[in-house]
Amino acid sequence: NGQGARTRAPGVKRACNECRQQKLRCDVQQDPFVSCSRCRRQNLQCRIEESFRRIGKRSKYAELERRTAELEHENSVLRQQLGGKPMPMTVPTVYATNNGPSSYTYHGMPPSDLDPNLQGSHEAVESLLDLKQGLDGNPQRRGSRKTPAFRTLGNVMLARERVAEIFEEYWQHYHRFLPLLDPQKPPEHYFGLSELLFWTIVIVGARQFPGDRELLSKLSPHYKTLYWATISAVPQNYQVIKALCLLCTWPLPVSSTSMDSTVIYCGLMMNIAMQNGLHRPSHAEDFSRSHIHLQEDDIRDRLKTWAACNIVAQSISTGYGLPPQTVYDSTLDPVLTLRTGTNSETFPIPEELRRRLELEKFANNITTKLYSYNSEASSKEQALFATMAAQDLQQQFDDTGRNHGPSIANLNDNPWDALYLGAVRLHIRLYAFFEPPHALTYRSDLVSLYAATTDFLDAALKLEGKGLKYATNYIMQMMLAAAYTLSKLLNSFFVAHLEPEREKGCILFSKTVAAVRAMSVQSNDLPQRLSEVVVQLWHYSGAGRSLAPLPPNSIQEMGSSTSSGANGNGNGLEQGSSGDIDDSLQLKLRTRMSMSLVYDSVWRWRDELQGKVRAENLDAAVRNPTSPEATVDS
């Protein structure tokens, strides 16, 4: 124009990726997005991406020919290397199954026996095994397979049938604790979404897998390599976030809390989720360099994944006694309303996740109001305020109809939801260990803590025959906190209040230790070690020596009537104001929120008791665990 200004020409209509690849006319509609007729007719995925570049047939065929030549060469060299090896080195281990054909697990040759340039060529190894074992040996059949006969991680190779068994183990025993994935999809679907997600499902399914109890330990080092290789590559596929959710829920076994990387993984999970825009599930394009057209199912999946991230992050905060990394805003309202084009659509969070999310939001409220201040530098006024806040939170939690509607009230209909409900109540009541002995409510708060502890453990032990050993790391941590609570209370002045309940408490302690030990997935892991520590503390304090009644003169006269318990359900415990109270229940370590008791007890065992209850070190003790009922001479 006369002023020399340039105006941008209107954008041309784009064809979808599939039509651009074939140089065909495309009738795709972009706003609102409607797939083109060709993609609908051929059941193709219709997408428009700015970064798409058409691949010429000559280039594609040249790459295929080059890759085929490489594989043929590697296959030939591998044949020569394996030709002189004894047959047992290359024959896969066969595990008979009751539900179908045998599955094959190939553990590979030692890395030193393979040419370094050939290690990691999974396709070549699979081809060679097919030829050696006669599995899909026909080249035409092998070329037409929909899924490979083997999946390989490091030097561990799993047959297709074995992978299916492990996935079935996951769906049957683990999926209900975090219903994030679709059980109707086959394993290859998840491998296509993300290799890390596929192997994370395998790792979780291998925890208690009866077909090979050593599979988890064989896979773990190679899984860690894959994990860090995947995480270091940016940008991340948002399906990786689902893998992190599972990994944080069922961490890899470790033998020391200082070696546990779960909190690090949790931080990565939340940050990658926000980097991918999951906290704004309908606006993925705002967090990407290319155009992304989301279908309604995509938005629902992103919203569900974001809800799962916050559930997992909050449970890690509670279980590890650390500040939460959660992000609670309107996106996580029970029903999210979004504008799609000219219409408004509602996207409800799935019911099974919504119930857990409400509980975890309340747990976050507890953490913020009770455990976020500096207990070491707090004044008497701050301590009094926190005590009042604890009472108010408990009242809110019990009065579900007024504060949280029917959803939490109905949790007791599901035994697993009831267990999580008890865990949140225990999270509140563990604050009793932070109260000063001179507080007016100190004695009654200890009674409420004991009731919350026994209620939670009763609910957990009822589920032993229903899959408790498969439960999440968070449930295991709360059961340990409850066991340490029993050990602390039953070895203090408070035992005088428990004469009608003392024997039950001792029996409950023994059953809890056995249940936590059953949740162990590897020798010398944290469930075994922390259980052994609490049993040694139990014996050293004297509670495990005898269940005989206390002498009459050791029971103080109570000045008030028998309480009905913390929640009005009747437990026969005394709440009188008379009797001796000392500071034996006070904690030195007070910085790990409701888990401070566990960490304080472990430090006490390490500094004062290690080697006194049993002469062996802890590594030796867990191989021959101490019985809670046995008398151990100190």
Image (cartoon, grey):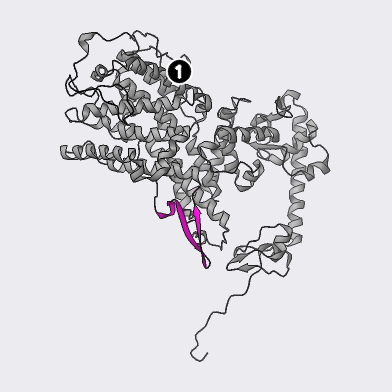
Counting every numbered tag in the picture gives 1
Q: Residue at x 29, y 38 (%)?
A: 395
Give the position of the C terminus as an image quadrant. Answer: top left
Q: Is residue 377 visible?
A: no
Above/below status of 625 relative to 230: above
Q: Quadrant of residue 71?
A: top right
Residues 119 and 140: in front is 140
Question: x%, y% of residue 125?
Answer: 72, 37
Q: Is 83 in front, or is 402?
A: 402
- Please state if 600 lies on the left or on the right of 64 as rendered: left
Residue 200 shows in the view: yes
Question: Which structural element holds mark 1?
Answer: helix
Whether residue 587 sits left or right of residue 284 in the image: it is left
Please name whichever residue, 191 or 100, is drawn nearer the observer in this view of the structure.
100
User: Residue visible at 40% across and 32% down?
Assistant: 258
The amino acid marked with disc number 1 is Val
Task: Return the residue found at the far bottom.
Answer: 2
Q: Which residues are drawn in magenta?
A: 329-349
Q: Position of residue 111 (x, y in %)?
A: 64, 32
Q: Is residue 325 magenta?
A: no
Quarter of the image for residue 184 reads top right
Horizontally, is 477 left or right of 49 in the view?
left
Q: On screen, 398 above or below 557?
A: below
Q: In this image, 38 relative to 215: left or right? A: right
Q: Which residue is mark 1?
A: 622
Residue 605 picture quarter: top left
Above-or-below relation of 41 to 217: below
Q: Horizontal and vertical percent for residue 517? A: 47, 22
Please say if 37 is above or below 85.
Answer: below
Residue 537 point in image, percent of width and height = 34, 18
Crowd band around label 1 with a 10 angstrom C-alpha radius: few (<14), some (14–19), many (20+): many
